[in-house]
Image (tube, grey):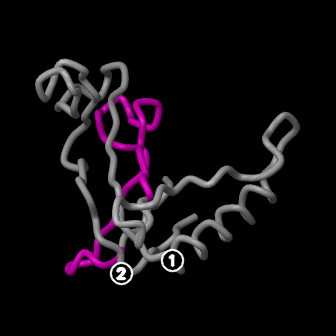
Amino acid sequence: MAYVIENVEALWPRLDRTYKFDQRENGGKGGSVPCAPSDQGAAYDLSFKMTKDQATKLYQDMAAEFAKAKQPGWDEKLAMPFKKSEDGIFFIGKDQLKRTSILSSGKPAHRFKWTPRRTKCQRIFS
């Protein structure tokens, strides 16, 4: 399934290689550091900023897919996956391909696809 989100702002894209969180970075505050795809915690990730209307629509679509795929033992409903931005106007979403989604070649099993102006992003599942 591909889902296209238009007119969002990409924040801190880490798509060129895998990264992991390291507590020792940034003076002990922690931060992302490049790593091998086989490292514990390795991931490609991308955060994005969207409006309340975009977040509402995306959440509704995600909740509908969750309801269709729901299995015994899962939560009753999908938890809100977005956080409000510091200014309270926008919502921040995050997509992450973890180590388990990375092929032995080091390439992601999924792809992010950007349009030239970087206003559209779609995640394609292989």
Residue that numbered label 2 is attached to: 7
Residue 43 forms part of the magenta stretch: no
Query: Does residue 115 belong to the magenta stretch?
Result: yes
Which disc number belongs to residue 54? 1
Please, which residue is most extreme toward the right here? 72
Q: Is residue 72 left or right of residue 75?
A: right
Disc number placed over residue 3 in the picture, else none: none
Q: Position of residue 5 (x, y in %)?
A: 45, 74
Q: Residue 57 falls in which quadrant of the image? A: bottom right
Tell which circle, 1 or 2, labels the residue nearer the N-terminal end: 2
Q: Is residue 81 above or below residue 122?
A: above
Q: Residues within 10 Å of mark 2 (few under 14, many from 20)?
A: some
Cα separation between marks 1 and 2: 9 Å
Q: Which residues are magenta?
A: 93-120
Q: Does the CB distance between marks 1 and 2 fall below 8 Å?
A: yes
> For this rendering, which residue is in front, 123 or 78?
78
Q: Position of residue 12 (x, y in %)?
A: 23, 53
Residue at 42%, 53% (x, y): give it.
Answer: 94
For label 1, count other residues whose C-alpha is less than 10 Å away and answer few (under 14), some (14-19) or many (20+). some
Between residues 85 and 47, which one lies in front from this camera angle? 85
**Measuring 24% from the left and 54% from the top, which residue is drawn there?**
13
Residue kind at label 1, given as amino acid type: Gln
Q: Who's the residue at 32% across and 43% down the image?
A: 44
The local secondary structure at tag 1 comes to: helix
Q: How many marks?
A: 2
Classify the position of the N terminus by image quarter: bottom right
Residue at 30% x, 78% y is 119
| 126 or 45, nearer to the observer | 45
The image position of residue 69, as x and y in percent, is 78, 52
Tell me the element at label 2: loop
